[in-house]
Every structure is written in C-alpha cells, then in structure tokens.
Image (tube, grey):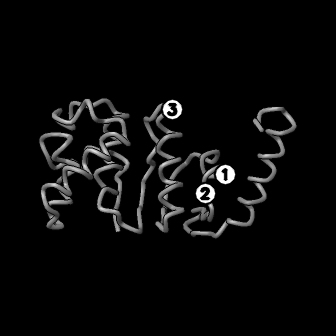
Amino acid sequence: MAFVFQNPEYQFVANTVYEEMAYSLRLDGKGNSEIEKLVEEYLELFQLSGQREKNPFQLSMGQKRRLSVAATIIQGQRLILLDEPTFGLDSKNTFALLEFLERYRKKGAVILMVTHDETLSRNYGTTFWTVADGEIRDTTESATDMRTAFSAELQLEGGMCG
C-alpha cells in the first residue's frame, strides 16, 4: 500500500528529485541498475527529467505534486491512496496524471482518491463514497446516474468530441 499526501512536502525525505524517487527502491533492496532504469522511466513519465538534481523543496507546486505521486508509486504497489492528487496542477498535468492512474488501475491497481472535485469524480471514478453527517455512504449508483446525466448534458451542448 502507498499513500500520497495532500501536501507533497510532508513526504519528501531526500535532497534531490532523483534520490527522492530512488529512496523506496533502495529500501526494497533493488540493485543500482534497476533503480536507475525505474527512476529514469518515472522522471520521463512525470516530466521531471530536467529536475533530477534539484532539491524537491525548490520545485514548483505542480512539480512537487508530480514528484510525490511518482516517488510513491514507483515501487508498483497495488493499493494507492491519494489525498487531493490534482490540487495545484494545471489542466495538462491533471489530465496526464489521471490518464496515468487510469492505465495503472487497468493493470490491476486499486486507487482510492479523496477529492472535493465532483467533476473529476464523475469522469474518472468507478466507485463512490460520500462523507456526510459523520457517515460514509456508498453513492456509486447515484454517481453513475450523475455521470450519465453529465455525459448527456455535454452531448446536448456539443461539448463532446467523437
């Protein structure tokens, strides 16, 4: 299991972006060549290649967010908990992150995401719970209805492509 904090700075433990990504792999006992390969792959995937020697605390908020997600999931955990993972990301990086998470989910991972963004939930979620009045409620059925209505609304307004 892996957890991505809402504030990425809470999880940084290394002095460079590269070492931040390599940290958990070293703890797992991975060899240097495997670490190098995985870190380079994830640096590229999360558009952080040019930042590899930079201190994580010197990155922009969007870069910090991407680093926190990449450094957390680089080990290939099957259960990922994310607290507001798109907060502070521009639309391009939001969509890139969500597309990555969707591919990761299709490979068998379980992704539990906490968000206040209902549009994001409607478009990317598969199961929904709502916290209200101190209770957790399964709202998957109503969320599916909302997704259908939202999709129909976009089609009526000509907002969907294809």
Which labelled disc corresponds to residue 122? 1
Residue type at the position of mark 1: Arg
Q: 151 or 88: which is nearer to us?
A: 151
Quadrant of image for the N terminus: bottom left
Percent position of residue 71, x then y: 28, 51
Q: Which residue matches tag 2? A: 125
Q: Nearer the viewer, mark 3 or mark 1?
A: 3
Residue 95 higher or lower than 115, as above or below: above
Q: How many angstroms separate mark 2 from mark 3 (CA)?
A: 19 Å
Q: Residue at x 78, y 46 (%)?
A: 151
Of pointers 2 and 3, the one earlier in the residue sequence: 3
Percent position of residue 141, x then y: 74, 66
Query: Is the Cβ of the residue at disc 1 closer than 8 Å to that at disc 2?
Result: yes
Residue type at the position of mark 3: Lys
Q: Which residue matches tag 3? A: 92
Of pointers 3 and 1, the one earlier in the residue sequence: 3
Percent position of residue 128, x then y: 62, 63
Residue 113 seen in this snapshot: yes
Helix, strand or loop at label 1? It is helix
Quadrant of image for the C terminus: top right
Q: Mark 2 packing: few (<14 Cα in 10 Å), some, or many (20+)?
A: some
Residue type at the position of mark 2: Gly
Q: Mark 1 packing: few (<14 Cα in 10 Å), some, or many (20+)?
A: many
